[in-house]
Amino acid sequence: MSSVAELPLSEVVEAFRKKSLSPGEYLDALTERIGLLDSSLNAFIEFDAVLARSRLARSSGGPLGGIPVAVKDNIVTRGGSTTCGSRILAGFRSPFDATAVSRLQTNGAYVLGKTNLDEFAMGSSTEHSAFGVTRNPWDRERVAGGSSGGSAAAVAARLVPVALGSETGGSVRQPAAFCGVLGLKPTWGRISRSGLVAFASSLDQIGIVARSARDCGLLFAAIAGNDPADSTSASEPVDAALDRIEEGIAGVRFGIVKEAVEQLTPGVRANFEQAVAILEGGGARVEEVSIPSIGHAIAVYYIIANAEASANLARFDGVRFGHRTSDARDIRSLYFRSRGEGFGREVKRRIMLGAFALSSGYYDAYYGRAQRVRTLMRRDFSNAFERVDFLLTPTTPGPAFRVGERVDDPLRMYLSDIFTAPANLVGIPAIAIPSGLDSDGLPLSLQVMGRHFSEGELFRVAYYLEREGGVEPMSPPAGA
Ligand code: GLN
């Protein structure tokens, strides 16, 4: 049964079409594999075989007919729970599906289950989940990354062919990198945020975890595009993402971000240079470019993200959603105690930092200044995109770290996002592409950033690297 569960999405679609495999049989195979592996991975917060089967029974035909998709548990789904990895949403039931989810359903797909995450997507390791850490399929002692660690681990361990995650500063790309799968952060506004529980609205996007460029493109084509329910969604027509995927990269101009590669460890540098050499082998032109402001990205990100989070999370007050304290004397203590009992440590830390950065007297010094640096960063990126088509960095400064290694050191944890946060601040699309293993056998990843709305071209680069360039989609060691 396992071998059926491990088929890539394109082969599953084909097998359904030829009727050599039925969606029900496929769900059985995945259910069996989840039963075998998820007790040690903890990728799912909610997997209920009966619920999944009823969703399959209600699913329709379409390009993704009968295809299961795992959904990060900060994206709302009707039926079942949506927890955001938090105790404060215990018992919450969404009355509607997120637009990305309903579009998947329109295309025939169904929700297999809900995946684990750092509470409210705040973190880089999934250790800040109220439901326990997600472990890395390549090495159970290591984190799967975060905050979409559950989605990345589920796809890497072949518990599901594709998954939705969310991105605010790297939460799809970083776990995808740690787990050896592909992760897409689309252009801000490209995929509707309706039904994505807000963390930092000017940075948030739903993203995709997949095993190949084609799979990623298939899902993207199904969910991208303008949505009346999200007034910030872009009205540009969606690039026919898959049409040009096989065109190759001859003559395409890539820029290596000088400031990013200066600080690499020898192992990561060697892996990065190897990926660059593969691109050059395909006729790409590669040069160094400078993004002087990139060194400020982490500081700017953590001011803006936390400021927006402190406002967005005000809605969890014990009145409207989820957990309510049993010990309230008046309205004030109802708010205080419900929030105090419901939120975990990292979320509280961020609400405090964000509220501080927005408080009178400090607003200009922190938030205002961060927004000005963000503008400079946009300028640096648009200057770079006048010279080159894509920018390259490693996705992360190193491979997956050990469980427990950084959880008590927030600043070190925050530095995991050093290469990913800039794309969120600037609003451009970026993709994490597996680039082989390090000397310990752990996955490393190449990040390619493109101009706004260039997702189709990112799939082309990813496709080239995986098919022509010899960087095959990797599977974790046997028994994963
Ligand atoms: N790791 C980053 C953070 O902790 C990014 C999170 C995300 O992209 N949701 O904020």
Image (spheres, helix red, strand yellow):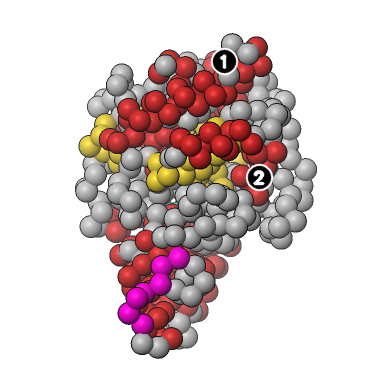
Secondary element type, mark 1: loop
Q: Which quadrant: the C terminus?
A: top left
The correct choice, above or below, for 256 with respect to 203 in the image is: above
- Front residue of 176/103: it is 103
Residue behind mark 2: 102
Place of residue 320 in the rendered image (x, y in percent of width and height, measured from the top left) = 52, 72
Magenta span: predominant SS is loop
Mark drawn on residue 389: none
Residue drawn at 65 percent across, 45 percent down: 102
Residue range in magenta is 322-328
The correct choice, above or below, for 304 with respect to 79 in the image is: below
The correct choice, above or below, for 339 with respect to 138 in the image is: below
Task: Specify the quarter for ligand 1.
Answer: bottom left
Secondary element type, mark 2: helix
Quarter of the rendering containing residue 30: top left
Residue drawn at 61 percent across, 28 percent down: 66
Place of residue 373 in the rendered image (x, y in percent of width and height, measured from the top left) = 52, 64
Relative to 212, 408 lies left or right: left
* Mark nearer the viewer, 2 or 1: 1
Residue type of the residue flagged with mark 1: Leu
- 323 in magenta: yes
Mark 1: C-beta under 8 Å from nearest atom of ligand 1: no
Place of residue 421 in the rendered image (x, y in percent of width and height, measured from the top left) = 47, 52
Relative to 128, 201 lies left or right: right
Residue behind mark 1: 21
